[in-house]
Amino acid sequence: MTYQFDFAALLPYWREFAMGVWLTLQLSFVATVLGFVLGTLCAIGRSDGAPWVKALVACYVEVIRNTPLLVQIFIIYFGIATLGLHVDANVAAVLALVVNVGAYTSEIVRAGLESIHKSQLEAAECLGLSRPQTYWHVIVRPAIERVYPALTSQYVLLMLASSITSQISAEELTAVANRIQSDTFRSFETYIVVGVLYLALSFVVRIAFWLFGLVVFVRRRKLGTAL
Amino acid sequence: MSAVVSLTNVEKSFGAVKVLNGVSFEVARGEVAAVIGQSGSGKSTALRCINALETIEGGQIMVCGHAVHDPKLDKKTLRRDVGIVFQSYNLFPHLTAEQNIMLAPTCVKGIGKAAARDLAREVLARVGLEAKADHFPEQLSGGQQQRVAIARSLAMQPKLMLFDEVTSALDPQLTGEVLKVMEDLARGGMTMILVTHEMAFARKVASKVIYMHQGTVWETGPGAMLDDPKTPELRAFVGSGL
C-alpha cells in the first residue's frame, strides 16, 4: 500500500468545488423552505382535517417513508418527462426533495402539535379566538418551537441527501465532484475533499438554524434554552 | 329578571354517568356566587356548561341574554361576555405576561398593538403585577400566573367571570394573593361565579352559596348558611373541613 496522495491535482478545480457548495446550499434552502410549508400543512391536515384529508396525508407519509429517496427522485424525474413536460433536472431534484422531506417534516410537526395540551385550546377558545387564530398563535408556533431541534436534524439530513440528486445530473456538490474525479482520476482525494466540504456545510446549516431559532423563538433567547 | 345567569333543570351525562341531574340556580348582576361541594358533585361541569365548554342534554341556560342551550348558539359572542379562569392557569407558555393579555384584544377585538399594550399594563396593575409584564409564565410563581390569567380575562371586559377552582393548585400564601384579587373584583361590582373549596372565602365574599350534591343543587343561601346548614349532607361537608 503505497498510495501517493495528490491533493495538489485538485487545486485548479477550487472554483468548481466552491460552485458545487453554493449550488448544494441553494438546492437545500429551497427544499427546506418548501418542505417545511408542505409538511406543516400536512401535519395540521392529519391532526385536524376531514377524514379524507387525514387518509390522504397518511398515505402520502407512509409511501414516502417506506420507499428509497433515489427511487422517488427517478419516479418524479422520469414521470414528469413521460407526461411530456420538460423540466430542468434541478427543478425535478428540488421537487423530489420537497416531497420527501415534507413527509418527514409532517411527522415531526404532528408530534409537536399533539404535545400541546388540550387546556391551551380551551383557554384560547374561551378568549374568543377563532380556529385559525388559535392554530397560529397557540398551537403551531409553540409546537414548532418544541420540535425545532428535531427539525434541524431533519434538514441537515436533507442537505446531505441532496447529493443523491446527482444521479439525475442535478447541479450540486456531488455532481461537480463526479466530474472532477473523471477529469483528474483522483477519485479518493476528490471525495475526501467533498466529504470535508459536506461536514463544513452541515456545521453551517446547524449554525444557521440555531441563529434563526434565536431570532424567532424569543423565549429561548430570553431564558437561554440551548438548541 | 335581572339574572345574568340562570340555569333551569340542566342535565348532562358523561357516558352512563349522570353528572348534572336537573340543576337550577340564578345569579343576579353584581352577585358573587360560590359553588361548593364534594369532588364529583358536578360543580365544575356546571360551570363549564355556562361557558358552553360542555353541551347539555336537557334544560336551559341563559347567560347575559344568550341562550346557551340553543344548538345555534354563537359561542364567540357568548365568550365576549364571559371570562373564565382555570385551575391550571392555562397561560400560553411561549408568550410573556403582557403578550398573553394582548393576544385576545388584538385578535378578537382588533385593537391596535399600542392600545392593547396599554390595556395589558392597566389590567396587570389591577392584579398587582405591572412589574412582571415582560416575564414568561415559567418565570412566575403559581399565584402570579393565576393573577396574570385573571388579568387576561379582565382585558376582554367580560360581564361575567367564572373561576374554576382557581386556587386548588396553590399553597396558602399564594392562595391568599389570588383571593385578594378576586375580592377586589367582587367589590368592584363584577358578577362572579366561583367553584371553590375555600370555605372561609365563600363565607366572607359570596353573596350566594350554592351547595351541590349528587348532580343537583342541594342547598342554597347566603354565606351565613355555612354556619347553620339545614341538610345533613351540607353539615357533614362543612364539618369535614376542620
Image (cartoon, helix red, strand yellow):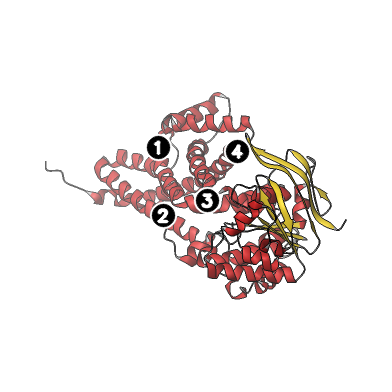
**Which label number is shown at residue A144?**
3
Helix, strand or loop at disc 2? helix
Whether residue A169 is visible, yes or no, is: yes
Are discs 4 and 2 less than 8 Å apart at CB? no
Instruction: Look at the picture and state if A103 lies above or below B231.
Output: above
**Which label number is shown at residue A164?**
1
Mark toward the viewer: 1 or 3: 3
Badge 3 amino acid: Ile
Host chain of mark 3: A
Specify few, some or many for label 2: CA neighbours under 10 Å numbering under 14, 14-19, or 20 or more.
some
Whether residue B91 is visible, yes or no, is: no
The residue identified by callout 4 is A45
Q: State the image coordinates of residue B231 (x, y, percent, origin top left).
A: 68, 52
The residues bearing labels 1 and 3 have C-alpha atoms spaced at a distance of 28 Å
Are discs 3 and 4 less than 8 Å apart at CB? no
Q: Quadrant of residue B16?
A: top right
Q: State the image coordinates of residue B109 (x, y, percent, origin top left).
A: 76, 59
Q: Earlier in the sequence, mark 3 or mark 4?
A: 4
Badge 1 amino acid: Ile
